[in-house]
Image (spheres, coloured by chain):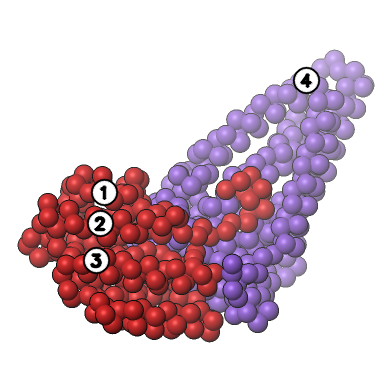
Amino acid sequence: MGLRDILTGRHEVKGPAPDRLFAIATAYVSLQAEHGIEPAGAAAIVFQALATSEFEATIKEMEEVVVATGKESGTTVATQDDSYGYRWMVLRNPSSGPSVEDLAVGVNAVSSSIETAGHGERLLCAVFAFKDAKGAPVYFIYNYKRGYWYPFVPSGAEQERSTERELQLKAQMGSELPIEPELERWFPLWGIPI
Amino acid sequence: MARGRSNFGKDTGLQARMLLTMFLLGLLYVVFVGVLFAAGAGAGVIVVVAVVLLLLQLFASDKLALATMGVKEVTPAQEPELHGIVERLCVQADLPKPRVCVMETSMPNAFAMGRSQKSTTVCATRGILEILSPAELEGVMAHELTHVINRDVMVMTLAGFFATLASMILQFAFFFGGGFGGGYGRGREEEEDIMIVILVSALVYAISFLLLRALSRYREFAADRGSAVLTGKPSALASALIKISGTIERVPRQDLRAAEGMSAFFIVPAKAKNSMMNLFADHPPLEQRLAALQRLESQLQGTA
């Protein structure tokens, strides 16, 4: 932000970075084949829902679009608000193989319709759920503002994450996914509903 | 590109007033420095001392204040909700996560400190955590983070530099009876010079005091606006402000005194309000802040 913005205290909320969401649609292949991490068949997009009729109409419209396009791939959509007031749009696709691609297409449809409505800065992140060999959840989170991915592995205990596992995943996936370079921006998301 | 929100959060008038205030401050300070240079010698020492103080203020004051206020850092496990709110706002604002602290007092308030985005602390009091809903708390924390984004601590410290300098000269003058270090064998002309410096300092101090207060109020409006833009919920912040100000007048005197020195950084000033003091208040009156937030909400709803 420039000197003039500092002097006038005029800060604009940043819109989404150049889209690198689809990196997951190819990266999951090596996750599956080389590292034994299976897609859990669900992804979610998280955003701030504005309490305006115009925004609600946008959401409703795009939900219908995602449902309609999801018919052939079998993707379902569910919406819920979390305790922080953020809206989760959860996409599920039970078929194991190409589901990550379908989910990425669905998530992208949601994010781009929010952007075309002029609300791109409301997007928080997208979450893709995976399972490791033992069935424990592994998440990859896409930060829209930064255009980076990072792994998030809750360790099972309350508010605890397995940083060790996350750093391993960074090393394993670093060449295929654009991973957030600043570790302090690997923000956890507790209580992910997928 | 934008449908329905194209003018959300635009406040050109506020920015113009802010720039005008800064311009007047700058003008005042230029005159002041000119007089100091004209007076020569003794003033040089004071300028050096003031610069040292300024650096100290920029680099150490936050730590000092935090240490004296009994603020303690909390881990995500201790305050999951507060951390969650701050983290999400940091993602939204593309900020590194600040240190999160809690102050154990029943007075509901919050503040942010630190000169840059990398060395920031946000703090909420126990009271505010208890009375606000998550959405309201989010509005308040977004207000504080906007102070960080706008670098308000830095701007206000720098803007106040010459005011500090002027007040130092005045204090020197009182302590040493008009002379800078001794005063033996001065010519009449030199005495006059010193009198002029003192008079100008008094004037600079008085005017800059008013300008700084005005600037501080404008920065508050800007932070309210930034919070609304960041969260998309102007009304949540408005409701938080109403709740906080309703409680603040009922808090015990002891807490108020303990927190007095901090009022410039609080979301609501720590002192109970008196309408006569509005001109001098660091924070704008509640009604004006609420009206500004209401305008933002109307812009958002597309009814403005």
Q: Is the residue marked by circle 2 packed among few (<14), some (14-19), or many (20+) residues within 10 Å?
A: few
Q: Amino acid at mark 2?
A: Thr
Q: CA distance from mark 1 to mark 4?
A: 66 Å
* Residue name at image x 25 percent, y 77 percent: A73
For residue A49, above or below residue B52: below
Q: Earlier in the sequence, mark 1 or mark 3?
A: 3
Residue A100 is labelled as 3
Q: Amino acid at mark 3?
A: Val
Q: Which residue was labeled with disc 1?
A: A176
What's the colour of chain B in the image? purple
Residue A138 falls in which quadrant of the image? bottom left
Q: CA distance from mark 1 to mark 3?
A: 15 Å
Mark 2 vs 1: CB contact within 8 A: yes
- Residue A104 placement (x, y as % from top left): 31, 66
Please report, as a chain letter, where disc 4 is located.
B
Between disc 4 and disc 2, the foreground one is 2
Mark 4 vs 3: CB contact within 8 A: no
Q: Which residue was labeled with disc 4?
A: B41
Please report, as a chain letter, where disc 3 is located.
A
What's the colour of chain A in the image? red
Residue A74 falls in which quadrant of the image? bottom left
Both marks 4 and 3 on one chain: no
Which residue is at the far top?
B185
Q: Which residue was labeled with disc 2?
A: A26
Q: Name the element at disc 1.
A: loop
Q: Name the element at disc 4.
A: helix
Mark 3 vs 2: CB contact within 8 A: no
Q: CA distance from mark 4 to mark 3?
A: 75 Å
Q: CA distance from mark 2 to mark 1?
A: 8 Å
Q: Nearer the viewer, residue B169 or B48?
A: B48
Please report, as a chain letter, where disc 1 is located.
A
Which residue is at the far front?
A72
